Image (cartoon, coloured by chain):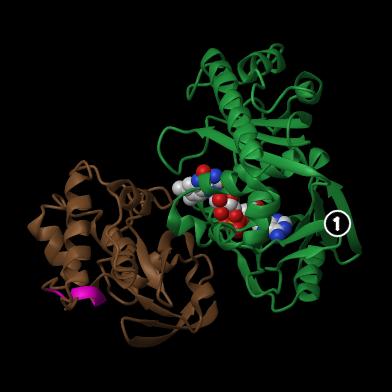
Chain colours: A green, B brown
Amino acid sequence: MRPAPFSYHKAERLDQALALLAEFGEDARPIAGGQSLVPMMNLRLARPSHLVDINALDLDTIELRSDHLHIGALVRHERYARESLIAQHFPAFAEGVEWIGHPTIRRRGTLGGSISHADPTAELPALCVLLGAEIIAQSAEGSRRIPAAEFFISAYVTSLEAGEMVTGIDLPLPKGKSSGAFEEFAERSGDFAIISAGVTLEHDGRAITDARVVWSGVDLAPVMAERAGDLLRGKPLSAPEAEAAAQAMSAGITPLDDPMASAEFRHSLIVELTQRALTRACEKAMQAS
Amino acid sequence: MSKTTITANGQTKNLSLEPRRLLADVLREDFRLSGVHIGCAHGACGACTVHVDGVPRLSCLTFAVQCDGAEINTVESLGGDDAHHLLQRAFREEHGLQCGYCTPGFLMTMAPYVEEMAAQDRMPEDAEIRHAMSGNICRCTGYQSIVAAVRLAITQRRNGESTQ
Ligand SMILES: Cc1cc2nc3c(=O)[nH]c(=O)nc-3n(C[C@H](O)[C@H](O)[C@H](O)COP(=O)(O)OP(=O)(O)OC[C@H]3O[C@@H](n4cnc5c(N)ncnc54)[C@H](O)[C@@H]3O)c2cc1C
């Protein structure tokens, strides 16, 4: 299949892109890496009348800004591995992005595209929720910050409005000692996940002082484990009782059931992957202490 | 229609293009480069991989109008019609192809990888090679012979053999 006809606009600057998005509203889509939009257009699942090419915009910085790390919307997936700031402050993020797609796709796909596309098992949306990211959305009218927990509404549905685009995200820096890990199960290397589990821990060198756990593949948007903090606070890093905690925090969860994987199989994966991620996050915390 | 200037394998054309035309189709139809194979047309198979300004890219997920001023290279530019590039010879030697449909994509994905490993003077583990080509699907070989071909090409490049 081939795409339906559209008009192509190449934006050279942000204000120009925003003016084009304002002018065409619902009929326009930004195109970044094209690694999700063009498949959708080729299959005629998307038929925008106007494409605003944003690849020339200056939105690919990764930098520390006071109490957070800013990542621009056009940062491509392959870049994180070379950024020491990511590995240093956000180990779960550093591990999670390694699971995105194949090399040719990673070289092209962007942060802004992945979170705006909001595939239910994409890694970046889950990582944004796990790390309490703020998503910066800009339109010709101005800009607003959307907490990740409110941004991802359902499969391929976000709280972005017509005329808005993502310019970047801010990740709050961990305050004290922290650690993290990310685990995933997919059918083939580089495929979208069936289940993934991300973990961040705060600790005092001996015991866990707080914890967050996120899953994708459970529902149509990333899901935070509600009781993660309560179940893990006070547990020694050397013996976090990861399996019991993973069982308890997923007890009331009913995952998706579809031809790809049954709810029962997904549930087993949630427990196993959460336990592995927790165990590794504790091991990393002990090595660093 | 958008005015677009594209150079493919050294040949420059000024084209007037419908924006919806995929780079893959323009290379095949306007440049007559039939080595660009289209498998799935949604990014899943890797058969249409070409180089845009030296970097592997899926030409089925790229609109030709996005390539104004770009230099494209297709499999034809590797080793000509007799396919004499070192990696193509390695594929022949190790039986890295059978029907050949996916081969141009594998070659264009892996040729820069072979150069990268040769530059580092390093033989990657098989798992690394498999990861590097994980975006390309082959239904004939079971991949083992393609891994062997890539290893052979890296060995030869590390021994100083030329690609041509
Ligand atoms: C075979 C294959 C395997 C893949 N596997 C994975 C995987 O395992 N995990 C994973 O996470 N992803 C995977 N992807 C998707 C890939 O990561 C995409 O790059 C990503 O989802 C979209 O980024 P993009 O820059 O290509 O966006 P585009 O395709 O350009 O755009 C996607 C959507 O976002 C919108 N958009 C783009 N940029 C912005 C912006 N700044 N603001 C607002 N809207 C914007 C577009 O209008 C469009 O609706 C895979 C893709 C393929 C083809």
Picture coordinates of residue A59, whole percent (x, y): 71, 69
Q: Chain of mark 1?
A: A
Judge from the rendering whether residue B51 lies leftward or rightward of residue A163; answer left or right: left
At 41% from the left and 48% from the top, the residue drawn is: B44
Q: Position of residue A61 (x, y in %)?
A: 70, 68
Q: Residue at x 65, y 17 (%)?
A: A241
Work out whether residue A158 or residue B109 is closer to the camera in this orientation and state it.
B109
Disc 1 marks a residue whose amino acid type is Asp
Q: Nearer the viewer, residue A2 or A134?
A: A134
Q: Residue at x 81, y 44 (%)?
A: A176
Image position, residue B18 (x, y; %) = 51, 71
Q: Which residue is mark 1?
A: A67
Q: Where in the figure is residue A72, as x and y percent of width and height?
A: 71, 63
In the current view of this chain or complex, which residue is farthest to the right?
A141
* Res. A55 image quadrant: bottom right
On the question of residue A36 being in view, the answer is no
- Answer above or below: position of A140 versus A268: below
Q: Residue at x 26, y 63 (%)?
A: B107
Outermost residue toward the left in this view? B93
Q: Is residue B36 above or below residue B94?
A: below
**Magenta stretch in the rendered image:** B77-81
